[in-house]
Amino acid sequence: MRRNHIYIILLWAISITSVYSSQKPIRVGTTAANFLEYGYGTAGCAMGDAYVSMARDLSAIYWNPAGLGYMNQNEAMFVYQPWLVDINTTFTAAGIVLHNIGTLSFGLINVDYGEMEVTTLARQEGTGAYFSSGDLAAILSFGRRITNWFAFGISVKYIYSHIWHMKASAFATDLGVIIKTGFFSPTGKRAHGLNLGMSVSNYGTRMKYGGIDLIRPIDILPDEAGNFQNVPGEFRLQGWELPLIFRLGISVNPLVTNRQQLTFSVDAIHPNNNSEYVNLGFQYKYKISSTLKAYLRAGHKAMFMDDSQYGFSLGAGMLMNMFNNKAIQLDYSFRQIGIIGNSSSFSISILF
């Protein structure tokens, strides 16, 4: 068994280091519903999105559904994440731990692009009318821990997008596993050893927009007399792939004491609409008292990607245990995104 673990770790390490020789960006701008790439979950965002092997809360719905299998309490989470150019995104989720079965959860990602003024070639300053647009993903996830060192998870999601009178939808699925090993454990316990994580996200159908905005009157026989002048014609748009993301990650704990724990995490990412890249993250946990824990996090997303605008990310959090085995967790993250701007994320979780 130990030899098998060594082979698995070597395979993970080779896969991650191969990203250093990543290709030039390919197929950029060839997918729809790219809000699925933003990253949802404040702790993961603070760690530079290097979270596929570390997800243990409801944000695992996004990063790796296998992490749900390691949840020990029911949880409700709300994430508010203002995005760029006044785009607002939220992630809301709830999960129930079914003992000896697994964790069943539901998550909802909502993106609001706000209102924009309608313009035309003739009236480029605006017509006085306004339109809105938005995206939504409803996700049903299940994670199960088969043994104390192996868990798997699966998600099914419905994705919906609209802009003015146009709309599109698609269905997709996510798959993931997390393996806990005893390697490099400073305490000798498997719980503090090296973790391996893998997930495939957004494998599904294509999105094809349709609506009344595509209907225009045409003259099908312009050179002939007859009542053909105002025949309604519709433009047929092609379907667009979803942003398929393959994540492979490792996390280790070089420092573990009664009060402190330092975690280092690295993920290799292979998307279908860009070059491969690496995410890097750190987390420092300090136990202030029996009822209070503090977290400091940092990371960097999209390392080794050509022309990446992502920079460093920072964050902090606090877990407060209460009576009757209840707890509240508060988290904050900040991300640099180059010339595009910066992004912050706020979340609150209730464990019960």
Image (spheres, helix red, strand yellow):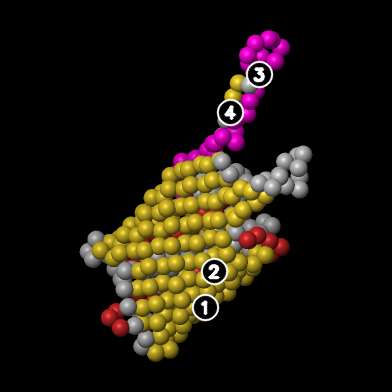
Which amino acid type corresponds to the residue marked 2 in the rendered image? Ser
Give the side of residue 141 with respect to residue 300, left or right: left
Q: Of label 2 and label 4, which has the lower sequence position? A: 4
Query: Tag on residue 234?
Result: 4
Q: CA distance from mark 4 to mark 3?
A: 15 Å
Q: Of label 1 and label 2, which has the lower sequence position? A: 1
Query: Tag on residue 345?
Result: 2
Which amino acid type corresponds to the residue marked 1 in the rendered image? Ala
Q: Position of residue 246 (x, y in %)?
A: 49, 53
Q: Which residues are magenta?
A: 202-228
Residue of label 1:
316
Query: Tag on residue 229?
Result: 3
Q: SS for tag 1?
A: strand
Q: Of label 4 and label 3, which has the lower sequence position? A: 3
Evaluate whether residue 195 shows in this view.
no
Q: CA distance from mark 2 to mark 3?
A: 54 Å
- Residue at screen point 55% across, 72% down: 333
Disc 1 versus disc 3: nearer the observer: 3
Q: Of label 1 and label 4, which has the lower sequence position? A: 4
